[in-house]
Image (cartoon, rainbow, N blue to C red):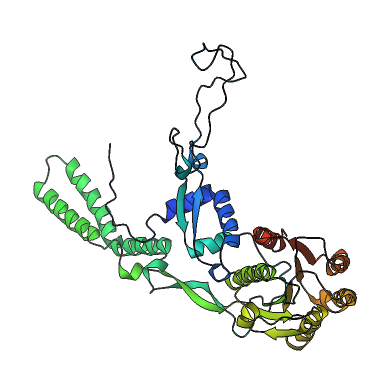
Amino acid sequence: MAMIIDRRLDGRNKSAVNRQRLMRRYKQQIRKSVSDAISKRSITDTQSGEKINIPARDVTEPIIHHGQGGSHEQVHPGNKQFSQGDQIKRPDQSGQGGGGSQASNSGEGEDDFGFDISKEEYLDLLFEELALPNLVKTKVVAQSAKAMVRAGFSNTGVASNLNLLRTMRRAKGRKLAIASPYSKRCRELEQLLEQELEKKPHNEEKIKELREELALLRSRINAIPFIDTYDLKFNQFIPQPKPITQAVMFCIMDVSGSMSQATKDIAKRFFILLYLFLSRSYEKTEVVFIRHHTSAKEVDEEEFFYSRETGGTIVSSALKLMRDIIRERYPTEDWNIYAAQASDGDNWEDDSATCRNLMIDSIMPYLQYYAYVEIHNQEHQGLWREYEKVAAMFDTFSMKQIRDTGEIYPVFHELFKRQEA
């Protein structure tokens, strides 16, 4: 039996196929680890790699074996500790599997299977099955990307673009064309040789001449190159402008005094996830950051996540600012407009009704999608109840509640889950 030993050095991506197969097989466990990692990381460490642990019981292969089956009772003879008929308590299971560190002195443990995933793999898993909903408008923008498209064939190119079928076809045609006169003469000589061989007695000198000429012609046919540089044909690609869809996402964060530091951290983690998702999945997407307390202000990324300014709460100030920015900079016929708002729902009593009217009359008719998250672990606030009326009128409005850090990713995944066409 032939044995193949791979003696190559451990080069980069040598085991990529096996790694991808492993990740496909244990996708559910890996996705759960990635989801749990969001709530454990610091805000500035959201996009690094992650260590994945798969329980040992999930790695074992299923086997078919004979079992006892059914329910049955066994009666064993007694000893110094037990008498006949006593029911024996089930042994402690702490020493069997589930991490070697928890193994008992008497039991046998088995370590979980652990491995690290890279930053790219982590982000791929994190944003898998997510997409901006209702992304329909397209426009070729000035800085649009160029896609490489097929543009026929050429006689020059790189080896990776070699068109094997056309190359072999040209080589075969060239060989037939060049060898055609020799082949025709070969067929004539073969007929003459057969005629001479049928004559009695043989003309040995004539037969020898025919055979020598036939061998010479066949050697010339065999000397024709199998593939020549004239035969090579390469696939040709040219850059072509690609129409891309442009979108703008408004990130609206409540930074009022009612938002505790823990609540603000949850809101920041939510928006960091959203920002990473947009920057990784979409080429032409702008993000507008709006912070608000009693007044709203458009800020840059640094101020949005790290400013400590606070105050009272008037949510309508942020909605009015978003409405004005849309009218000024983002015409709805050219842009897909999205918004995500995070707040604890605490608002001035009269302002929540104003927010509802603004959403219904001036904002929602022009937006592709609006996601509202209320970060609160108690009863819903007045803003939630007003927004429920907006949700009843517009299918493009979604609202969820986040109670703790463990719900950040599930809520984010639910809000931006890819919708089936």
Q: Is residue 214 above or below residue 181?
A: above
Please identify the residue farthest to the front as the structure is shown: 80
The quadrant holding residue 134 is bottom right
Residue under the point 86% across and 68% down: 382
Q: Quadrant of the N terminus?
A: top left
Q: Is residue 377 above or below residue 107?
A: below
Instruction: Name the residue nearer the viewer: 245 or 337.
Output: 337
| Residue 129 in which image quadrant | bottom right
Q: Position of residue 164 (x, y in %)?
A: 40, 62
Q: Indicate whether 29 appears above or below 167.
A: above
> Where does residue 224 sit, x and y in percent of width and height?
25, 62
Front residue of 67/138: it is: 67
Residue at image x 70%, y 59%? 414
* Residue 275 falls left or right of residue 372: left
Q: Nearer the viewer, residue 230 or 138?
A: 138
Q: Quadrant of residue 154?
A: bottom left
